[in-house]
């Protein structure tokens, strides 16, 4: 008799990391590959952050603070909110998984746009909830009116990724505020703002002000992108104390390790340096987007640290060939078909040298296969 596993495992889609086929993350680290598949920062952590990590390493014989007290205090000061409303986590993905566990069950409904963050389909599958995917509107943007129309008495969770991953498109704050105002109070709205610092339309803090008016709103942020800490997996939610208690009840204790806590606390001390890196990334984004256009490729209007590139009318046919050509040139990008958009590529911005190599190789490949 073989071991019997939970039947729901068959319906849970796997998460495909941005590591080239046949390689491990260890193989890729430190190699000459241009790693443009995972929306990471191309910059190393700030020297002061590295020093804080090294200083904390000597006390790894002790468990981390389970409450992440100092980190919550500093984040509260950063956003002007009570620390009791902040939930640090092992990346914002942990919050999403815990929220699904705490809020969803068979018979409940979850609504989200598609394509969007590839973790979202996992939430419905693991909980048994009914998922409702709302297609993006023209321009690869969220169709908020269509999402509102799908909300019913059974809806427990609505997810809005802004800027959206994988398309990079940004919904202005005024539209978000109107949307949240119209969502019924029984529905938890998770506003996933992993890339909020890279958009140039609104103050990144604008959405925080909505929390005082809407107890059903949760905002997700992360240190993985603009703070160059993807390897330490530290993110956080800002919501109601009740939401924090709910997700804490269903996740493991000590979820944010001590090195991650030390790094995040120190990173918050260097806002100007972080903003300078963000500005550099935005300037490089403009240059790279112009490079795509010079090769006759169109992109969604991005407000993130990556581009969503259409490969044209026969894009779905040539997508795998283009990805293979780029891999042969030592450039790793993310296939659109894995993210709900066959015929598209999601390409993160790397260093200037990496981006130049990518643009040249991509242009050559598209011309060859078109």
Image (spheres, grey):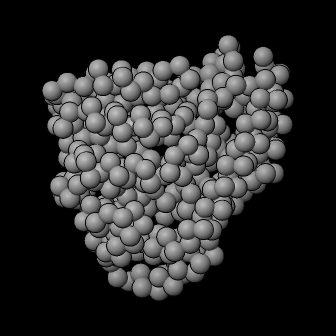
From the viewer's perspective, tell me whether residue 240 is left or right of residue 139.
left
Q: Quadrant of the N terminus?
A: top left
Residue 312 visible somewhere in the drawing: yes
Q: How many marks?
A: 0
Relative to the observer, which residue lies in front, 71 or 15? Answer: 71
Which quarter of the rendered picture does the C terminus lie within? top right
Horizontal side, residue 216 vs residue 281: left or right: left
**Residue 158 sits in which quadrant?**
top left
**Residue at image point 55% right, 62% down:** 227
Write the residue at 72% across / 42% down: 286
In terms of depth relative to the viewer, which is nearer, 246 or 37? Answer: 246
Residue 145 screen position, x and y as percent: 36, 22
Q: Nearer the viewer, residue 255 or 150?
A: 150
Question: What x and y, as percent, mark residue 21?
Answer: 62, 40
User: Residue at 41% across / 34% down in the picture?
Assistant: 175
Q: Is residue 13 above or below residue 192?
A: above
Residue at the (62%, 42%) spot, across then down: 306
Q: Could you tell me if residue 250 is visible in this image?
A: no
Where 139 falls versus 351 (above or below)? above
Residue situated in front as seen by the camera: 116 or 188: 188
Q: Is residue 184 left or right of residue 260?
A: left
Residue 108: % across, % down: 18, 31
Residue lying furthest top: 313
Going by the image, does 90 lie left or right of 290?
Answer: left
Residue 316, placed above or below residue 142: above
Q: Quadrant of residue 296?
A: top right
Q: Position of residue 60 (x, y in %)?
A: 41, 81
């Amino acid at each position: 008799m073989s071991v019997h596993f939970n039947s729901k495992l068959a319906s849970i889609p796997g998460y495909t990391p941005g590591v080239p086929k046949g390689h491990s993350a260890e193989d890729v680290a430190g190699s000459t590959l241009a790693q443009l598949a995972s929306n990471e920062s191309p910059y190393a952590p700030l020297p002061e952050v590295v020093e804080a990590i090294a200083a904390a390493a000597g006390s790894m014989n002790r468990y981390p603070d389970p409450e992440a007290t100092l980190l919550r205090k500093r984040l509260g000061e950063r956003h002007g909110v009570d620390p009791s409303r902040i939930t640090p986590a092992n990346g914002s993905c942990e919050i999403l998984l815990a929220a699904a566990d705490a809020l969803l069950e068979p018979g409940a409904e979850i609504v989200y746009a598609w394509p969007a963050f590839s973790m979202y389909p996992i939430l419905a599958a693991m909980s048994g909830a009914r998922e409702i995917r709302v297609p993006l509107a023209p321009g690869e943007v969220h169709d908020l009116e269509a999402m509102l129309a799908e909300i019913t008495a059974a809806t427990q969770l609505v997810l809005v990724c802004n800027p959206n991953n994988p398309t990079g498109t940004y919904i202005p704050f005024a539209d978000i505020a109107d949307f949240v105002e119209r969502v019924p109070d029984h529905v938890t709205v998770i506003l996933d703002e992993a890339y909020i610092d890279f958009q140039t339309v609104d103050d990144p803090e604008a959405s925080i002000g909505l929390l005082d008016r809407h107890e059903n709103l949760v905002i997700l942020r992360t240190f993985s992108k603009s703070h160059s800490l993807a390897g330490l997996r530290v993110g956080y939610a800002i919501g109601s104390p009740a939401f924090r208690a709910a997700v804490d009840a269903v996740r493991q204790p000590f979820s944010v390790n001590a090195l991650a806590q030390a790094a995040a606390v120190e990173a918050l001390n260097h806002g100007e340096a972080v903003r300078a890196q963000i500005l550099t990334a935005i300037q490089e984004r403009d240059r790279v987007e112009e490079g795509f256009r010079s090769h006759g490729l169109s992109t969604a209007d991005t407000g993130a640290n990556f581009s969503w590139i259409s490969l044209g009318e026969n894009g779905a046919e040539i997508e795998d060939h283009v990805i293979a050509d780029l891999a042969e040139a030592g450039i790793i990008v993310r296939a659109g078909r894995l993210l709900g958009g066959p015929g598209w590529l999601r390409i993160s911005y790397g260093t200037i040298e990496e981006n130049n190599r990518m643009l040249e190789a991509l242009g050559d490949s598209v011309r060859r296969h078109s």
